[in-house]
Amino acid sequence: MNVKKETEIRKIEEGKKKVVGTICNDKDCHIHGNLKTRGRIFKGKVIRKFHKRIVIEFERMIYVRKYERYKKSKTKIHARLPVCMEEEISIGNLIKVQECRPLSKIIHFVVIGKVGEDGK
């Protein structure tokens, strides 16, 4: 499984060159490959990072009918991290993921982009 990386270079008005990002030849990249995204979109904090995969966590409110109250619950989601986004996303970032077809046993989401830094 050999993934080639190429860099995309754009010229700015002053004549300087700036590296915008890497172009990946990954077939499971939603930008440069054939992966279609559909369904739900979540925002969460990156708690673990692996090669081509990250784990995000976010809180949600669940209604408990017995007690007629809400409880806080944390949810972890494993998402595919394209090679072209690996350098810009790190642990602690706030990112956006979107649902896609099942890529493996636990990966059903793909990273869409970075929302910002978490203040903690």
Image: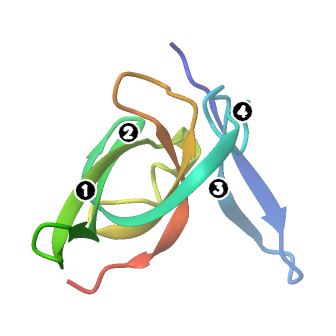
* Relative depth, front residue between 109 and 39: 39
Badge 1 element: strand
Q: Label 2, label 4: how many angstroms apart (C-alpha)?
A: 16 Å
* Residue at mark 3 to residue at mark 4: CA–CA distance: 15 Å
Most extreme residue toward the front is 66
Q: Residue at x 31, y 80 (%)?
A: 118
Per the model, the C-alpha gap separating discs 3 and 2 is 18 Å
The circle on residue 53 is: 2
Circle 4 residue:
33
Q: Residues within 10 Å of mark 1 (few under 14, many from 20)?
A: few
Q: Identify which residue, 78 or 46, lies in the foreground.
A: 78
Q: Quadrant of residue 66?
A: bottom left
Residue that badge 3 annotates: 21
Which of label 1 and label 4 is nearer to you? 1
Question: Residue 50 at x, y = what percent?
Answer: 30, 39
Which comes sooner in the sequence, label 3 or label 2?
3
> Number of marks in the image?
4
Distance between the alpha carbons at the discs numbered 1 and 2: 16 Å
Looking at the rendered structure, the kind of residue marked 3 is: Gly
User: Which is closer to the viewer, label 1 or label 2?
Assistant: 1
Q: Determine the secondary structure under disc 3.
A: strand
Instruction: Give the residue type that dot 4 points to.
Output: Gly
Reading the image, the residue beneath label 1 is 75
Which comes before the other along the chain, label 2 or label 4? 4
Compared to residue 106, the image places residue 91 above or below, namely below
Q: Amino acid at mark 1?
A: Thr
* Amino acid type assigned to the residue bearing label 2 in the image: Arg
